[in-house]
Each structure stands twice: as C-alpha cells, then as structure tokens.
Image (tube, rainbow, N blue to C red):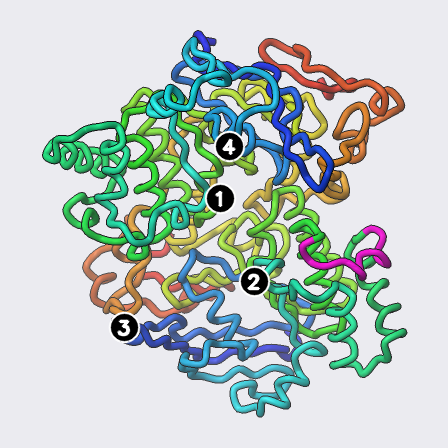
Amino acid sequence: MTAPLLSVRNLVVEYPVAGKTLSAVADVSLEVGKGETLGLVGESGCGKSTLGRAVLQLRRPTAGKVVFDGTELTGLAAEKMRLMRRRLQLIFQDPIASLNPRRTIGDIVAEPLIIAGVSDKAERDRRVREVLTAVGLDADLVSGRLPHEFSGGQCQRVCIARALILEPELVICDEPVSALDVSIRAQILNLLEDMKRRYGLTLLFIAHDLAVVKAVSDRIAVMYLGKLCEVGPTEKLFAQPAHPYTALLLDAIPVPDPSVKPATNLSVGEPPSPLAPPSGCRFRTRCPRADAVCAEVVPSLREIADGQFAACHHPLV
Amino acid sequence: MSAPLLSVEGITVDLPTPRGPLRAVDGVDLTLAPGSTLGIVGESGCGKTMLSRAVLQLLPKRAKLGGRIMFAGRDLVTLQPEELRRLRGPELAVVFQDPMTSLNPVLTIGTQIVETLQAHLGMDTVTAMRRGVELLAAVGIPAPEQRLRQYPHQLSGGMRQRVAIAIALSCEPKLLIADEPTTALDVTVQAQILDLLAREQQRRHMAMILITHDLGVVAGRTDEVAVMYAGRVVERAPTPKLFTRMRMPYTEALLAAIPKLDSPPHTPLPAIAGRPPDQTRPLKGCSFEPRCRYADDHCRSAKPPLADPERAGGLFACWHPL
C-alpha cells in the first residue's frame, strides 16, 4: 500500500442517549492510501456514517486520532479545520435533500468557491462550467435551474460537482447510490470512478451493499456494531471471507439468476442494540460459530492472510 | 392454468400535471392465478406503483383510470366504496416500501393489529390480542407480547416491516401486493423479509405481486416477471425463461447494470445511458428507442406491440428482439 493519506487510530465516538452512552464507533483503526478507494460496509446503525463524519470532524471524536496528510485533525482549531475541509469533501445519500431547494444549480456549485475566497466571478463561472461538464451535465442547460427540476441521479451529479470544485484530495461518499435506481446507480458509480482518475482522488466509500462496494473499492473494511470485523483486499475478501459476518453479508446479496436459490436461514435476527452490545465478540449473538471464548474475550484484528485482517476467534480461513 | 384470481385488462392511468396529462400506465394487461407470484420490475416512474395502486383502488383522487380490473369475479373499478372497504383486508392487502410511514406513529403496534382484526373479522378485543401475538410470532418478531405494547418508533426498520406484513396477513388475504417491501432495508434484513413473504405465501396459498426495481430480488422468488418501462409492460415471461433468454433489450440493460459479484473491482458497469422519456410527451415509436443500442428508423416510427410472435411462451414488445 502507498503511504496513507488518511490514518484513523483507535477512534472512539460516543453519543449520550437517555442517560446512557452509545459507542457508535468503538476503537477503530484504519488507513486509506493515497489514490486508494477503501469501501466501508455494514448494516444501518453499525457506525459507518459516524466514522465518516468523525474523520471530517463534523462530529468530534471522544478519543483517538484522525491524521490527514501528516496533520492531526482531532486537535485542530475550528478556523484551521475550516481551511482543511477544502481538501476533504463529503457526498451524502439523499441527493435531493442535500441541495438547497431555493438556489440554482449554478449557485450551489459555485458556493464552495465563494467560501474559499475566489472573488473573480468570471473565474468562478469558468470553474463551475468545467466541473458540471466533467460530471456529465450541460452547464448552459442546468446552471439557472432549481434542484426540483432534476431527477435523483442528476442531483447526485450536482452534489459530486459541488464536492469536486475545490479539487479535494479525499472524498467521503456516504451511501452515494443507495437512493438511486439500478440503472442510475451504474451511471453514478462509473462517474465516481472517472472522477477519481481525473482528479486523482482518494475515496472512502461507505455503503451497506457489498456488490456496490466491490465495484469501486481496492480494499474493503467490514464494520459491525461500532467495530471492524474484517479488512482486506477486495478480491480476497470476496473469494475467501474470513469473518462469519462478512460471509453473511455476501450470502444475503440477491443474485439475478433464478437457478441460484436464495440462501435461507441466514443468521437470524438483527444487530443487538448498540446501547448494550454483547460481551466479547459483538457478532456472537448472530454467529453460527460462536462458543464460550467469544462471550468472554474481545477478538482483536489480526492478520489472517497476506493483507487480510479479521477480528474473530474462529475465522473461516 | 386455473381461473385467474386477478385479471387486469387495458389499464390506463392518467395524472394531471402542469405540462398536461401524464400517462403513468399505458394499456397494461395482466393475469395472476391463485397462489402464484408475479414480479413487476422497472425504474422509478415506470408506472409499477401506479399500476398496483390502480388494482388496490388507491389512486390519487385526480388520477383518471381506464380499463377493467377483475378480481375474484368482480370488477373493482365499478365497486362502491363500501364494497371495496370490505374487500381490503380479507381479500386484498398491501405492504408498502416505508414501514415508518405506513404504520401510525401515535398508536401502539397492538392497537393497529387489533383494529384491523376487529374491523374486518369482527373479533372481540381479547381474541384479537391473542391473534395479534400469534401473528407477530409468525413473522419472526421475538417477545411478541411486549412488542404489542410498543410504538413503531421503538422498532427497527426490519421489525416495522415485519409488523406491516403481520397486519397485511392478519385477515388471510387472497392477494398481497408488496410494493418495494425491502428497498428501505439492509441486505441481510432484506433477505429475511423476502424469505418471510415467500414462506407465508406458500403456507397460505396466497397470490402475490412483488414490485421492485431490482431484478436480483425477483429472480429466485417469483413464478413470472413483468418488466415495465414508461407505463407499459415491455416483457413478460415465466421467471426461469426470462433469465435464460431475455428478448427485450431493456431487460438486458437492466440486468447488466447490476454490479456483478464475479467481476473484478473497477470494472466499468454497462449503465443505461440517458433517462426514461417524458410521459407527458409520448413517443410515436418504442419508448425505449432513445436509449436502445439496437434501435433503427422502424423503432422510431412504430410502437412494437407486446406479443409472442414465436409462440415461445414469453411476451415482448420489441422490433429487434435479442
């Protein structure tokens, strides 16, 4: 792996909930190399979005470090962080809700430039036109129009344009295609890949759908109830999942082939409440391989095969 | 095939818009045998939800409906509101996409189940409560007695959808319409909910219409699939046949756009270029023509009918089938 652009070390993010403490992210460490796409996968409530936000300091971590290109973001003063955000951008799940309904597409995409102090209007217009064209929109047709005049897929293109206009180095994509139809999803995934090449981006791609994550990621990190279960190169993780939870996620993907019978008896139930996570391994209540050790000892992430790490007492490989 | 439970003939749905009437459903014919499952697949705006709303007689007030909907020997279009009300529940039931908005947030789960059982089956409260516990247990909800006292917001999305399914199944309907029942859910929960629907359907010999935008969802779980595009059914065939030999280029494109588990990372996806046509401005020829790689002049000038010219057991609407 190339030198990490982003390094997250022992990150803890806690929320106070009804007098109790919810550990949304419980001691997570990971690295994203320059130019790499790391896929972060897990079910709703596993902490993947919180992790993304904590990287950007939109939610200040309770403990741990976030180091971006040699600078530690966790201790950074607000003003310095504001400047740093030009190099880190975020794309959200709901493209329509994340655009101001009363402003034109041209204004929305130009706003980061205004905040960054680009005072020359002609220069701003030129860059807006350039980035809109890059994301596959006709600048002349769309600039003066409002978000409601566009479909979800087109709004997501606008969001991507807005995220890219300051030419950031790291883009965190939080479920960027889960609100989109299958056909539009493919267009946006292809666009993200093109933009990654064109702008030399590093991506942290957060999603719950392993098939989508596979299409774009070099490495994948699987998260469950605030902890990482498995991290590894994409192909290896798919060919040989080491953690039973990764295997469960893989089995749950609907295959568009009627001769493949859908897997039944997938580990029953849903994740337990993160307010009261199980002792030991957090996945043990749904795990077919769980035994006494799993209830007592928290498994640590260890190297199972070359570059493949799993936090499991009884890995599948 | 046995006598159809549902037979939809020449359904059209027109919605008024500032740009003129929008033809959301454009002449759809469908039949469904008792106990069988039909998958309806298509992109947002293809008319799949409007078609199901037409069957349920739950169209927006300003929508204009044409055609006939025969259900168990009656034409639903001509039924009086009171007759329709009696039909919903014991004969026709629905599960919507978003279980948060389809459950009443200020009533407990128990109240909502009991209300249904009392209104449609005339049960007394005690019997209805007991039945409610059985129903929640049947859809895989742990500790059902406690759940009855809880409100929807206290349940996860998957659990809420199980409750919605329990309510839909409570009066033993002959037909269940599931409109994107798992789109708002996680993959593992999606698999569980689809299993649950399949199991209950077989057990009750209930017919089901499963509406989704994902061909992967219908592949293993339906008897027949109808693919919709721009308000029309463009291909319809028994599920195994559709997947082994699809004839309509749109179906092929829809399938190709799903990320494949066996292709390596960074493989560009064959996306369908462009977007569906503006249905306030119907095209003269095939609606898919502007996005189709096989299209020619004939496709632009004449609309292909949904037919089975080769008598091969599958219908498609295309001048240049695959």
Can you say whether A185 is above or below A198 in the image? below
> Is disc 4 in contact with disc 1, using a CB cutoff of under 8 Å?
no
Callout 1 crowding tier (Cα within 10 Å): few <14, some 14–19, many ≥20: some
Q: Nearer the viewer, mark 3 or mark 1?
A: 3
Chain of the residue displaying label 2: B
Callouts 1 and 2 in the same chain = no
Q: Give the mark, 3 or 2, whose residue is nearer the N terminus.
A: 3
Callout 4 crowding tier (Cα within 10 Å): few <14, some 14–19, many ≥20: many
Can you say whether A213 is above or below B143 in the image? above
Residue wearing tag 1: A178
Which residue occupies 43% across, 79% down? B10
Determine whether the residue tagged by mark 3 lies in a helix, strand or loop.
loop
Q: Is residue B20 visible?
A: yes
Q: Which mark is residue B179?
A: 2
**Structural distance between the alpha carbons of marks 4 and 2:** 27 Å
Left or right relative to B302: residue B176: right
Residue wearing tag 3: B18
Callouts 4 and 3 in the same chain = no
Q: Nearer the viewer, mark 4 or mark 2?
A: 4
> Is disc 3 in contact with disc 1, using a CB cutoff of under 8 Å?
no
**Structural distance between the alpha carbons of marks 3 and 1:** 30 Å
**Structural distance between the alpha carbons of marks 4 and 3:** 39 Å
Residue B42 coordinates in the image, percent (x, y): 45, 57
Q: Amino acid at mark 1?
A: Ser
Examine the image and state in which quarter residue B319 appears: bottom left
Callouts 3 and 1 in the same chain = no
Residue B264 coordinates in the image, percent (x, y): 47, 26
Chain of the residue displaying label 3: B
Q: Nearer the viewer, mark 3 or mark 2?
A: 3
Chain of the residue displaying label 1: A
Residue wearing tag 4: A206
Left or right relative to B242: residue B116: right
